[in-house]
Amino acid sequence: DSQTRRGHPCWYKLDKVQKIAINDAFTVEMLVFKLLKRHFGQEKYYLQLLDLFLETTFQTECGQLLDTLCMNLTLEDFSVERWTLIVKYKTAFYSFYASVALAMIVFGIEDREAYDAAREVLMVMGIYFQAQDDYLDCYGTPEQIGKIGTDIQDKKC
């Protein structure tokens, strides 16, 4: 399990937090939807934004589940295909596609092919980003990456 993030102890590692961190995560997620409604609830595209946030949350949670399930696997079970599936859902959708799709929605783009084209290239970018991140997790120093890399020990790459 990760010990640090951006040079600081992980939130769940703090004595005053520990398992409360899961509750904090649910609270932050709910606040995203409250803010979305407060600031965009009257917009004609609100339901599209809501749908994108819900879909992205679901995809990210599926990616996290795929990642967590790796703790029950052996080295022989790992493959590039498994890793790609994990990072596509755990990282690429929310880090790359969602922000571009949000802008497309706000600007009134309705062409489904435009969303598909954006998704195609942004998924590749997200997977490439995660490959770099995993490499740095393994070979970078805590000073370089702002955390103590534990992905291999945690069976995350």
Image (tube, rainbow, N blue to C red):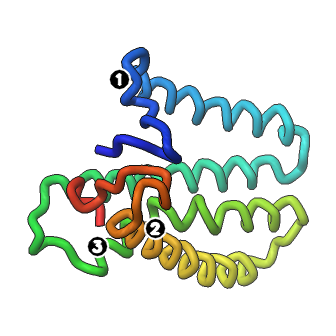
Q: Callout 2, which amino acid?
A: Asp
Of 60 and 130, nearer the camera is 130
Q: Residue under circle 2? A: 133
Quadrant of the image for the C terminus? bottom left
Residue 150 in sight from this viewpoint? yes
Q: Label 1: state its secondary structure.
A: loop
What crowding class fits label 2: few (fewer than 14 Cα within 10 Å), some (14-19), or many (20 or more)? some
Q: Callout 3, which amino acid?
A: Arg
Name the residue rendered at 64%, 68% in the picture: 97
Q: Label 3: state its secondary structure.
A: helix
Percent position of residue 121, x then y: 62, 83
What crowding class fits label 3: few (fewer than 14 Cα within 10 Å), some (14-19), or many (20 or more)? some
Q: Residue 19 carries which label?
A: 1
Q: How many numbered dots are placed on residues in this image?
A: 3
Of 48 and 154, nearer the camera is 154
Q: In this rendering, would 28 be left or right of 70?
A: right
Badge 1 or badge 3: first in the primary sequence: 1
Name the residue rendered at 11%, 70% in the picture: 75
Q: In this rendering, would 123 be left or right of 87?
A: right
Q: Name the residue furthest top.
A: 16
